[in-house]
Every structure is written in structure tokens, then in C-alpha cells.
Image: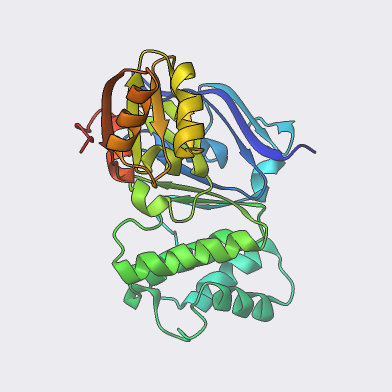
């Protein structure tokens, strides 16, 4: 089996005249924390429901674990889902809710299994407390516990931090990272890139149902890192000078005229002076600083100028 355990090809979902998901393509590797980022209404939940087998695509293909899947395919059973409502009984305890689901799964040694699961999600001290008296964060952790019954290979979480206070967000973040360390591949959606960046290893930005960017964590952080943007007549003439005279090693050539310099030990005036002394004219040079949220807003058409 290849390292890609999920692949979607030209995946589309239409609701009458509305196209919720529009020809989406991406791959998810085993062990990744895959971040699906997009504003409200971008199609995130619809996309996750198709991957989890809750709704059928209008067109396109889904491959799970190297197999093309159709309706009611058994490979969907290897998914654990927390999408929209948790679907638990508010007048029952966390233990009782999990026990009812475990019975439906036909699990053996349920008491030990459920106690281990409650401990894993940090609800082992809730005892007989009814779910209706849980905090929002506790309800989200219970929802994750429900999704983990049956030991899925893939955990799908739709906006798991939505509406949580800072402590709740921190608890869910730690739980996601701990679960990933056990080998579970996690797909998590959010409209908050700043928070998603603390857990995800790869990102797809979704806007109006379309994928507008597919980027790794390293690439994303590089895009948002402080840098100097430089335009010269010919980048290929400037690069050897920058390397030899200023010791610049971390840079990216954007095109034949523009260079992004990520080394922080040099100042703009040093660069201009050194290039001028070696016969390279600088058209413009500017410092660039961009937050993750600015980057996201810029990609989805809501951002402004991010230069200092």
C-alpha cells in the first residue's frame, strides 16, 4: 500500500443549482494532520462528509487505502467522524453514552475499553455527571471519544475548536497531537489558520468550494516568515554576490527579477550597498511581515496590503 491513504479526484457535490464542492483534488498521507482551512460556507463540512461516507459525491472519485470506493463501502468504517452535532444523550453520563455505542459495535470487555477511552480524552473523572452539564470543551472531547470507538485509522474533526474558550482550545489541541502520536491520521477543518497551524502538517485552503492552495507546514511558515523582498535587473547576477559578500544562504528566487531573502542577519541598506558596488541596480527593496491570518485572508480575497 502507498503512503497516501486518502485521495480525492475531481470531487464535486451539487445541491440543486448550488455547487458546494467544485472539482477538488488532494492526497493525504498516513500519519498526517491534514488541515482543511476555509471561511464559513467554503464547503469544508460537505467535503468531509463525502470523505467520511455520510453523503455521496455528485461526481469525482474517492480512494481510501488504495481502493476506489463507492456507496456504502466497507472502507468508510475505518473512519471516525465528529461532524456537526455529537449525537449523544444529554441526560446520560459520558460513560453511559460510550457504553451504548460500544454495545452496538459488539465490543468485548466494554468497561475496560470505555474507561481507557475516557482517560485518553480527559473525561475519566466525570463519573455520573450528565452530559448536559458538561462545558463546551468537555462535549467536544466526548465527541472525539465517540469518533474513536472502533479504533479508526482516520479521525475526521469538523471545526472542533469552534466556540471554545482558550483553555478548551488548548485541551483539544493537546488531545489531537497526542492522538496523532499513536499513529492516527487526522483531518481537521477550521476557519482559523493561526490555531490550525499549531497542529497541522499540511494544509488545503478551500474557497467557494474550490481548492485555491495546497501547501505543507514548512512552505506556509516560509511564506509568512519575515523576509526582504528585492527586485533587480537580473536575479542570476545578484545571487552570487549576495552569497559571497553577505553570506546569504536562505533565499528564494521568485522570477528572473525578484528575490525573497529569509536570512535575518543582513539589513536592507547592506544589500543595496553591496549590490551597487558590484554593478547590480536595485529597483526596490522592502521588508515583508505577514501573519498567518493575513496570509489566509489574502488567499481568500479579503486581505489588504501586508507590507511594512
Q: Name the quadrant of the C terminus.
A: top left
Foreground residue among 208 and 3: 3
Residue in the image at 28% along x and 28% along y: 285
Image vertical order of residue 111 relative to residue 27, above or below: below
Q: Residue furthest front?
A: 277
Q: Residue furthest right?
A: 1
Q: Is residue 48 visible?
A: yes
Image vertical order of residue 60 relative to residue 35, above or below: above
Residue 169: quadrant of the picture: bottom left
Residue in the image at 33% along x and 21% along y: 231
Residue in the image at 42% along x and 64% along y: 140
Looking at the image, residue 68 sits to the left or right of residue 171; the answer is right
Give x and y (percent) for residue 79.
62, 49
Foreground residue among 91 and 179: 179
Q: Is residue 20 visible?
A: no
Looking at the image, residue 56 sits to the left or right of residue 232; the answer is right
Amino acid at each position: 500500500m502507498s503512503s497516501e491513504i486518502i485521495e480525492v479526484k475531481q470531487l464535486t457535490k451539487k445541491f440543486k443549482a448550488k455547487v458546494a464542492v467544485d472539482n477538488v483534488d488532494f492526497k493525504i498521507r498516513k500519519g498526517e494532520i491534514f488541515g482543511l482551512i476555509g471561511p464559513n460556507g467554503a464547503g469544508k463540512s460537505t467535503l468531509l462528509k463525502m470523505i467520511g461516507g455520510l453523503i455521496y459525491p455528485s461526481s469525482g472519485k474517492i480512494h481510501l487505502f488504495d481502493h476506489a470506493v463507492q456507496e456504502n463501502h466497507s472502507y468508510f468504517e475505518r473512519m471516525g467522524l465528529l461532524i456537526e452535532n455529537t449525537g449523544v444523550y444529554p441526560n446520560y453520563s459520558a460513560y453511559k453514552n460510550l457504553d451504548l455505542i460500544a454495545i452496538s459495535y459488539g465490543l468485548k470487555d466494554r468497561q475496560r475499553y470505555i474507561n481507557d477511552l475516557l482517560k485518553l480524552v480527559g473525561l475519566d473523572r466525570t463519573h455520573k455527571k450528565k452530559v448536559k452539564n458538561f462545558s463546551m470543551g468537555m462535549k467536544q472531547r466526548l465527541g472525539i471519544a465517540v469518533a474513536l470507538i472502533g479504533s479508526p485509522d482516520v479521525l475526521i474533526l469538523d471545526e472542533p475548536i469552534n466556540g471554545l474558550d482558550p483553555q478548551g482550545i488548548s485541551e483539544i489541541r493537546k488531545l489531537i497531537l497526542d492522538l496523532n502520536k499513536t499513529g492516527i491520521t487526522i483531518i481537521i477543518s477550521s476557519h482559523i489558520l493561526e490555531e490550525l497551524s499549531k497542529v497541522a502538517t499540511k494544509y488545503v485552503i478551500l474557497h467557494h468550494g474550490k481548492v485555491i492552495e495546497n501547501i505543507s507546514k514548512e512552505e506556509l511558515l516560509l511564506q509568512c516568515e519575515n523576509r526582504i523582498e528585492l527586485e533587480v535587473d537580473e536575479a542570476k547576477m545578484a545571487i552570487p554576490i549576495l552569497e559571497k559578500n553577505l553570506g546569504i544562504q536562505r533565499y528564494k528566487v521568485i522570477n528572473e527579477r525578484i528575490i525573497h531573502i529569509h536570512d535575518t542577519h543582513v539589513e536592507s541598506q547592506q544589500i543595496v550597498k553591496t549590490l551597487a558596488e558590484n554593478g547590480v541596480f536595485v529597483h526596490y527593496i522592502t521588508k515583508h511581515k505577514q501573519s498567518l491570518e493575513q496570509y489566509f485572508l489574502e488567499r481568500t480575497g479579503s486581505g489588504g496590503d501586508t507590507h511594512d
